[in-house]
């Protein structure tokens, strides 16, 4: 089956426990961009990878993940490849193969049986040192402090960090946007509200993890589906942010300001034959920003490379970037996820799903450099970080950037459960 790739923020959360089967089986039927808080308990299920048009009555076909059991390409009874029961599973990498240029730094068990987006923040610890603290955004709209890497706990009432949903919106049907972004020690989580006619409003909440007593700051964010921490700014893909705009695009807000003043940073294209939605974003350690949008009809991400100087100007109140005019990172229809790693980005490319999660095909690193200043961004040849050729025995739940940019966390899920694996170049 060909993946119909969506931004992580577009995936449906359904309460689906990982079955006793040898494959992860996060099957949730038809796709829907988010998850209703009044439909599921605290933990949210894994994301759906079938296409959605953003309406609450989405009629997309079921992803129909490959069934477990007898027959099919994953069964050895017909002389074909070995099944996931028979395939060797490394305790950390599962059935993934590590590229020669990369290494596993360390890993952490994520002790949940359903999908949970996370963020990693460098924080001061009680002993006077610093550590990588992991936060998780649960399906009920609460963000939890899961613990210091690699000792992580499941979300519960004792480790709630903050409520991402405004008190007024708690009265409505709320669908969380399954992304948790961080910058300068702050966290941002988003959600949307729905009525019978479809999505109507939305919001993002910001909390300074170093000063949690300062409380939560909130901005209206209708249509939010993509977020990124960028220096002292958060970028938000949607139909507006706070009092800024009402057009589809990428909005920015400086979180270091005492009073938040968001503005439009980039405009999505208008395509008569297609619906354009917020997509994937990342920023490299050498200042190259990738801004993407998702083409519903074409079922593909378009990842664009605007000039860094134009990003800086737009964040300072200058003209918004026309993303359609910016060069494309890679022309491919199999991009499923994106995260920063050093002077480049890690891109998940796959043509297969297992249940409602993208199976690991190839996780590739693209070096991004600026050899001629504003003459353009040079894109290096892809270098394989992880790969798999099995029948979806190991799937990728998420890609998580790490403070400092020299490592990236890859969420892997297989018959051994979920792990967060930190990778770096050799």
Image (cartoon, rainbow, N blue to C red):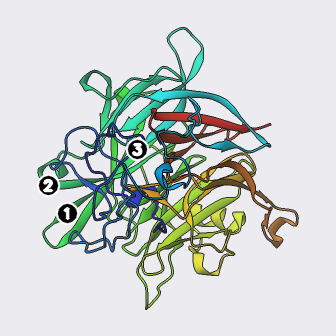
Across and down, in percent, residue 239 comes to: 37, 69
> Which label belongs to residue 22?
none
Query: Which of the two marks, 2 or 3, is nearer to us in this view?
Result: 3
Q: Is residue 22 above or below residue 382?
A: above
Q: Earlier in the sequence, mark 2 or mark 3?
A: 3
Q: Earlier in the sequence, mark 2 or mark 1?
A: 2
Q: Is residue 299 visible?
A: yes
> Which label belongs to residue 24?
3
Q: Secondary structure at mark 2?
A: loop
Q: Is residue 338 left or right of residue 221?
A: right
Q: In which image quadrant can residue 289 be found? A: bottom right
Q: Secondary structure at mark 1?
A: strand
Residue sitting at x 74%, y 45%: 99
Marks 2 and 1 in Cβ contact (< 8 Å): yes
Q: Which residue does the numbered mark 1 point to in the structure image?
A: 194
Across and down, in percent, residue 250 comes to: 49, 66
Q: Which residue does the numbered mark 2 point to in the structure image?
A: 172
Q: Is residue 129 left or right of residue 25?
A: right
């Amino acid at each position: 089956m060909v993946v119909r790739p969506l931004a992580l923020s577009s995936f449906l959360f359904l309460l689906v426990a990982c079955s006793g089967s040898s494959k992860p089986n996060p099957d949730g039927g038809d796709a829907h961009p988010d998850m209703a808080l009044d439909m599921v308990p605290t933990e949210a299920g894994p994301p759906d990878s079938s296409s959605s048009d953003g309406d609450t009555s989405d009629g997309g076909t079921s992803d129909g993940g490959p069934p477990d059991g007898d027959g099919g390409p994953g069964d050895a009874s017909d002389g074909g490849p070995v099944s996931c029961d028979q395939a060797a599973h490394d305790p950390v990498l599962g059935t993934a193969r590590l590229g020669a240029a990369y290494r596993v730094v360390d890993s952490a068990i994520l002790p949940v049986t359903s999908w949970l987006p996370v963020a990693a923040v460098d924080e001061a610890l009680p002993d006077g040192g610093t550590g990588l603290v992991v936060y998780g955004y649960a399906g009920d709209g609460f963000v939890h402090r899961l613990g210091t890497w690699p000792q992580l706990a499941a979300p519960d009432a004792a480790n709630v960090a903050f409520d991402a949903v405004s008190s007024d919106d708690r009265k409505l049907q709320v669908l969380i946007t399954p992304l948790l972004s961080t910058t300068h020690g702050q966290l941002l989580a988003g959600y949307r509200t729905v009525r019978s006619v479809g999505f109507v409003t939305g919001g993002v909440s910001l909390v300074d993890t170093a000063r949690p007593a300062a409380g939560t700051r909130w901005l209206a964010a209708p249509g939010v589906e993509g977020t990124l921490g960028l220096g002292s700014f958060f970028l938000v893909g949607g139909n507006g942010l706070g009092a800024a705009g009402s057009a589809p695009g990428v909005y920015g807000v400086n979180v270091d300001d005492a009073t938040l003043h968001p503005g439009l940073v980039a405009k999505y294209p208008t395509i008569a034959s297609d619906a354009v939605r917020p997509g994937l974003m990342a920023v490299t350690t050498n200042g190259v920003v990738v801004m993407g949008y998702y083409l519903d009809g074409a079922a593909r991400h378009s990842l664009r490379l605007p000039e860094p100087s134009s990003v800086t100007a737009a964040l300072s109140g200058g003209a918004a970037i026309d993303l359609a005019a910016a060069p494309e990172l890679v022309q491919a229809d199999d991009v499923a996820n994106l995260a920063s790693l050093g002077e480049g980005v890690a891109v998940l490319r796959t043509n297969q799903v297992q249940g409602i999660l993208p199976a690991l095909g190839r996780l590739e690193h693209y070096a991004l450099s600026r050899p001629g200043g504003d003459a353009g961004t040079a894109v290096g040849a892809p270098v394989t970080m992880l790969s798999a050729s099995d029948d979806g025995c190991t799937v990728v739940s998420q890609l998580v950037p790490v403070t400092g940019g020299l490592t990236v966390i890859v969420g892997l899920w297989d018959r051994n459960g979920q792990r967060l694996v930190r990778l770096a170049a050799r």
